[in-house]
Amino acid sequence: MDPVIPCVPCPVTCYPLRLQPGEEIKESLVKKNKLNAAFIMTCVGSVTHASLRMSDSKTVKEYKGNFEIVSLVGTLSTGAHLHASLSDKDGNVFGGHVTGNLIVYTTAEIMIGECSGASFSREHDTRTGFKELVIEKRAQEG
């Protein structure tokens, strides 16, 4: 498994998306967008609930309340690998790996980019124990 393709310029197409109150962000990004090699360019909005896994890869914390999305980053293909930073009413910031239950409060305005010359998939990596990103050059259409 060669996890990296050469750094080659790749045209990017942008897809704006607005999620409504009550929608779950991770699930919506996978379900609504059948993209091959996509990534989150930017996101602003707010959530009422977040399930975030901490850096020890075991601890999952549940947050309930009204939180601003400070950042949302990640890759999208058949699944989503997302990390979020959120802030509470006092401006305290926390974040982690999104495991799900990132529920929109007022809005989530998301700009998605897709690399038209690449294809993303995920394969189990024995070194990390997780399904990790595999990048391949996309076959030419036509």
Image: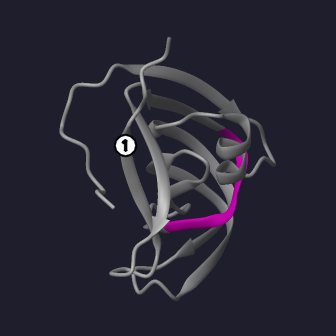
In this rendering, the answer to whether 77 lies above or below 10 is below
The foreground one among 113 and 60 is 113
Magenta region, main secondary structure: strand
Which residue appears at 58% of the width and 34% of the height? 35
Is residue 70 in view from this perspective?
Answer: no
Which residue appears at 58% of the width and 82% of the height? 60
In this rendering, the answer to whether 5 lies above or below 137 is below
Magenta stretch containing residue 101, yes or no? Answer: yes
The spot of residue 3 in percent (x, y) is: 30, 57
Is residue 90 in view from this perspective?
Answer: yes
Which residue appears at 49% of the width and 59% of the height? 122
Tell me where residue 1 sits by quadrant.
Answer: bottom left
- Seen in the image, is 40 located left or right of residue 1? right
Residue type at the position of mark 1? Glu
In this rendering, the answer to whether 92 lies above or below 56 is above
The spot of residue 87 in percent (x, y) is: 49, 60
The foreground one among 51 and 58 is 58
Magenta stretch containing residue 100, yes or no? Answer: yes
Q: Number of numbered discs present?
A: 1
The spot of residue 10 in percent (x, y) is: 30, 25
In this rendering, the answer to whether 55 lies above or below 31 is below
- Image: magenta residue range: 97-107
Tell me where residue 13 sits by quadrant.
Answer: top left
The foreground one among 24 and 135 is 135
Instruction: Count residues near mark 1 (Cα–Cα under 10 Å), then give few for <14, some for 14-19, many for 20+.
Output: some
Which residue appears at 50% of the width and 11% of the height? 142
The foreground one among 60 and 115 is 115
Q: Farthest residue to the left: give it.
A: 7
Dot 1 falls on a residue whose secondary structure is: strand
List the residue tagged with mark 1.
136
